[in-house]
Each structure stands twice: as C-alpha cells, then as structure tokens.
C-alpha cells in the first residue's frame, strides 16, 4: 500500500539551542515553546483544552482513521535534549502533563535561582588593579547567567552595580563618567585601559633605550682599548 507524503503530519522540530537541558535554559525553552505553540495554534495541547481521544473499548468498532492535514503541525515528542527520565518527564506523557510537570518543578526552582543570580551580580565588586576589560567580561557573564534563569538585568543595573562597587581611589570614574550610559562608560574605560597599557609600554621602552646605549658605549670603549 503506497503512502501519501502529503498526509504525513508536519512535526515541529526545536533547534539545539532551544531544547531543554535543565534549569540553566528553562526560561529560554519556556518562552520559545509558548511562542511556537501560540503561533501554530497548539496552545491547547499545553493548557489541556485539546484532549487526546480515549482509547476505544474492547470489542468496539473504531471509526476509520482520518489522515491529518499536511498543513496542521503536531506537538508530539517532548523537545527535551537530555534523557527525559532525568527530569522526570517520561516519553508517554501528553503535552499537557509534560507542561504541568515542568512548570511546577522549574518555576519554583527558577525563583530561587533568580534570587541567587541577582545576588551574585550585586556582590561582584570591582577590585582595584583589575583591567576593566576583565571586570566587564565577568560582569556580563553573570548577567547572561541571570538572563538564562529568567532574570531581567538591563544596562542600568550593570551601570549601577559597577559604580557602587568603586573604591575611593576610583571616584574619578564617577565624576567623569557617572552620567554616561553603561555602553559609553564601558567604552571609555576600555580606552583608558589601552592608554595605560600604551603608556607603560612606552615607559619601559624609554628606560631600556638609555641602558642599551650605555652598554653599547662601554663595548665600543673596550674595543678601542
């Protein structure tokens, strides 16, 4: 019996970076799944308003199967990257059961994770002598980690976090760049780092040149003798 390709369901496939691996990307997975379900008319599978038909009773004559429309997508396999049993979502769960299990488990855990992520950002202080590039790189990594668990951390938060962590020796930053946006502040300090590095390099070269001349002079005098 030949099969009609147009009768096959249009399955939804999640890309690797949108599959659930755990709490670290739960917020991204949740938002993506809800967006896809809403745009494809599959939200009912998640909220339980679309219910799977009951299995026919023993001996009952079932109605002929109707081929699904090629245009209608189906929410079938759970888009989870890791082995489902590891997060207690077996493969035989319906989409609604899966969604209820995940939201009940991760929403509570996410609240704790968000609180910890914000605390990590607030406690990250600038240590005098640290290159600004290194500081901002780590600060933005903490921001990304917070975003992954559902926190909303904007440039104003990073701006405030940095300025309030400055010691008295760095109040000049607050005086000269305190009114700048986070992006402008970061650019100004990265440029400052480059200027300091260039000045140190020039000073080292200047100190080396006279010493080289002295050594060369002694060598020439020795050769004449």
Image: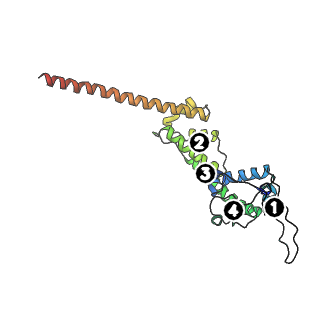
At x 56%, y 40%, the residue is 162
Q: Earlier in the sequence, mark 1 or mark 4?
A: 1
Left or right side of 142 for 100: right
Circle number at residue 161: 2
Q: Residues within 10 Å of mark 1 (few under 14, many from 20)?
A: some
CB atoms at circles 3 and 4 under 8 Å apart? no
How far is disc 3 from disc 2 in space, using C-alphas?
13 Å
Residue 113 picture location, percent across and down: 63, 55
Relative vertical location of residue 29 with respect to residue 210 in this rendering, above or below: below
Name the quadrant of the N terminus: bottom right
Q: Is residue 167 visible?
A: no
How far is disc 3 from disc 1 in space, using C-alphas?
33 Å
Circle number at residue 48: 1
Circle number at residue 95: none
Q: Earlier in the sequence, mark 4 or mark 2?
A: 4
Q: Nearer the viewer, mark 4 or mark 2?
A: 4
Residue ID for mark 4? 105
CB atoms at circles 1 and 4 under 8 Å apart? no
Residue 45 picture location, percent across and down: 79, 59
Residue 74 picture location, percent across and down: 77, 57
Residue ID for mark 3? 117
Q: Earlier in the sequence, mark 3 or mark 4?
A: 4
Q: Residues within 10 Å of mark 3 (few under 14, many from 20)?
A: many
Name the quadrant of the C terminus: top left
Residue 214 picture location, percent across and down: 23, 25
Relative vertical location of residue 153 with respect to residue 200 in this rendering, above or below: below
Q: In terms of image quadrants, where is residue 72?
A: bottom right
Q: Secondary structure at mark 2?
A: helix
How far is disc 4 from disc 2 in space, using C-alphas?
31 Å
Q: Nearer the viewer, mark 1 or mark 4?
A: 1
Q: Is residue 199 visible?
A: yes
């Amino acid at each position: 019996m030949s099969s009609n390709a147009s009768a096959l369901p249009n399955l939804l496939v999640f890309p690797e970076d949108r599959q659930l691996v755990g709490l670290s990307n739960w917020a991204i997975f949740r938002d993506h799944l809800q967006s896809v379900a809403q745009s494809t008319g599959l939200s009912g599978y998640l909220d339980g308003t679309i219910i799977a038909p009951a299995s026919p009773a023993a001996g009952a004559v079932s109605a002929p199967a109707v081929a699904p429309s090629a245009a209608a997508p189906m929410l079938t396999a759970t888009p989870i990257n890791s082995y489902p049993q590891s997060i207690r979502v077996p493969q035989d769960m319906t989409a609604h059961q899966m969604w209820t299990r995940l939201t009940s488990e991760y929403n509570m855990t996410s609240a704790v994770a968000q609180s910890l992520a914000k605390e990590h950002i607030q406690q990250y202080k600038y240590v005098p002598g640290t290159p600004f590039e290194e500081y901002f790189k780590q600060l933005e990594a903490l921001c990304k980690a917070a975003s992954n668990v559902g926190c909303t951390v904007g440039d104003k938060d990073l701006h405030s976090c940095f300025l309030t962590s400055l010691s008295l020796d760095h109040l000049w930053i607050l005086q000269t760049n305190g009114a700048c946006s986070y992006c402008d502040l970061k650019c100004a300090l990265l440029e400052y780092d480059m200027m300091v590095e260039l000045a140190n390099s020039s000073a080292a070269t200047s100190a080396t040149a006279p010493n080289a001349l002295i050594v060369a002079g002694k060598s020439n005098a020795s050769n004449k003798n």
